Amino acid sequence: MKGLALRVAHLFPKLMNIYGDRGNILCLQRRCQARGIAFEVDGLELGDPLKAKDYDLVFVGGAQDREQRLVAEDLVKVKAKPLREAVKRNVAVLAVCGGYQLMGRFYRTAEGEELPGSKVLDLHTIHPGAQAQRFIGNIVVEWNGTTVVGFENHGGRTFLGDGIQPLGRVVAGFGNNGEDGGEGAVYRNVFGTYLHGSLLPKNPKFADHVIETALRRRHKDFRLSEIDDAVEDAAHAAAVRQATRRSIIR
Amino acid sequence: MLNSSSSLVAPGCSYNISVIQRTAAVAAAKATAAVSRRFRLGGGTALPGLVAERIDPDVIQELSAQLNLGSVIITGTNGKTTTARLLRSIVKEAGLKPVANRAGSNMMRGIAAALVDAASWSGDIASAERRLGIFEVDEATLPLVANAVRPRAVLFTNLFRDQLDRYGEVETVAAVWRAAVSELLAEATVVLNVDDPSVAALASAAEGRVVKYGMEDTSSGAAKLEHAADARWCTACGSELGYAAVMYGHLGHWRCPKCGNARPEPDVFCGLFQTGANGSHVTLKLPGGLVEASLPLTGLYNAYNALAAAAAAAALGLGRAAVQRGLNSATAGFGRQERMFVGGRDVQIMLAKNPAGLNQVLRTITANGSEADLLVLLNDNIADGRDVSWIWDVDFELLEGKTHSVTVSGVRAWDMALRLKYAGIDGGGATTHVEPEPAQALKRALSATPEGSTLYVIPTYTAMLEVRDLLARWAGRGAFWEAE
């Protein structure tokens, strides 16, 4: 594919880089380059404007509490509007963990404070208080006829609005809220999820789905070619085994 | 600190009852330790302590109060065990008798077990006049232990992201430490690594004396901040810190460009650091003058450990001669650059539990220049951290083109294989071999290592226990795997 490029906006790489989010960017890069697709990534920090038309994919990862607070403010003031515009124009978004929570309408902290979100997705997140169980562990989600596997670690419970679907169904683990069996969210070309691990490297099918979705906006019917995923598939299968074995014991 | 057991007793008879309780606790714990050793139920490091605490919740307070020279606590993400070991060596050279907990057994029960071990059956610490407690303490357990032993000095090594599923976030740990420092006795000394901004910030919470240490020789530092850098934000105003020199992780010579908050001048520092294949050499500046010492340990992180131990010794008023002799005569600890000789191969265990630590291990191994033989073991048990995503924050790219053979093992061997594939060390290819079962993996890694060469074994904590056990059994034997 001559001249093809995936242009990625990485939101807050310095502030939101916990839980191996770097692996997601490395994965996008590697899987593009393996197909001869150029990979361009711009890190956008606090105050940097988001020119959404310049990008095929917006990625935002997870953060510690202090950073998440800084990011939430900037997201609402500086980046939310162009981000919502971009979503309308079918730009793809991948939001993981803290980034996923920030895509919603609001996040209510353990102390009851309500932090506004970017309102990209019709969902909200509530932290039920410092004493509530934190959702920590390996997680397997049924997605698109296959599985997505990773690790979740969140206190907040996320509830989806009516016009929005979960990314998948929880096979082992907690997911959005530990109640309704849903994990993550999909709306237009936006993917939100609690899974890290890192998420993309050992979920090559999902990674390719995100890349294809991002590129199809400008290249209709675009399909990625097959590449050697032997190690990826083995890592995926081993992680699924580990997650389901543990959940039986629990 | 109030404990239900003693506070419910009438003041007049509390003394006697607490003595009876303590005696019973110590005796029961000692019996447990003896049984545990007799039937080889483990090293007897935790269970006796648990028994003692169950019978007498104040056992740590009561026994540690008998240590005439008081206690030192060492805490931090990385370097606790080695720093405590080096300090123990210095303290012995100074003619004192340290009471110390075993490596890794660094919660309340581990401290209780160490004290019980030092006590007689009647609950008295033997030769108490020369006894100094040296306790390495888990980051989150620090407030409890500090409250019980009322230490003379507390040393903080560093604060890195580590097992986020267990400890919570770095900021949470920093807040716990701050509160613990402000609760210390006014006469307690706080010993701080000022190269770590969040450790340096603890000085403002301290009521008593502060001893600051840091690296002045920046020649072994990293070119830039690593991916795993955490505390790169100013603790005073939140702006991004600037670095005149990065040592490793977020350690270095930092300054806030906005508010001027900057690394304080250290009282104790390392002015010269040189590392080789088998050891390293440090020149330390202590309050009274210089100390030059040779360590059997390599890598910048161990220079920090030596510096930390020297700073603690200075805080305790120990002489420079003891520091020098103590560092010179130190040996590698449990899984920390511990060496064994198996089948004509030199095997070195380099425990690594988090991104900052593993980056340091990789830098130390690749500094030798020769192509390394590696066995990397990744487990995800509770003591390792259940979340393995931290391996994506490690700069395995440092290894590219610098390995002779790579074997990966452990419960999450395939996650590690994938990470190495991304680092340009091809998983499943000619050089990387995946073998989840540790004994098989160790045999494979040994046979891939040329005779006379070094096999570097890089395990997470529980994998270290497994592989160390195997190596201890095989040490001194020939290349037995070739016959099988």
Image: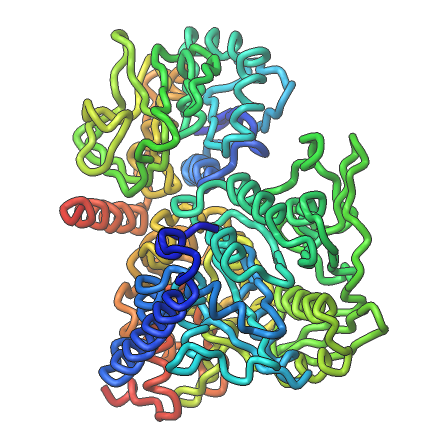
Counting from the top left corner in percent of width and height, residue B473 is at 32, 85
Residue at the right extreme?
Answer: B289
Q: Nearer the viewer, residue B45 or B390?
A: B45
Residue at the left extreme?
Answer: A248
Counting from the top left corner in percent of width and height, residue B229 is at 59, 45
In percent of the image, x 44 and y 42: which residue is there?
B168
Counting from the top left corner in percent of width and height, residue B445 is at 37, 74
Quadrant hosting residue A123: top left
Q: Nearer the viewer, residue B41 or B31?
A: B31
Quadrant hosting residue B365: bottom right
In percent of the image, x 39 and y 62: which residue is there?
B13
Residue B159 visible here: yes
Residue B400 visible here: no
Counting from the top left corner in percent of width and height, residue B22 is at 38, 70
Colouring scheme, one of rainbow, by chain, secondary structure, one colour: rainbow
Vertical arrangement, residue B351 with respect to residue A180, above or below:
below
In percent of the image, x 54 and y 68: which residue is there?
B65
Residue at the front extreme?
Answer: B12
Quadrant hosting residue B440: bottom left
Q: Does B12 sit left or right of B303 as displayed?
A: left
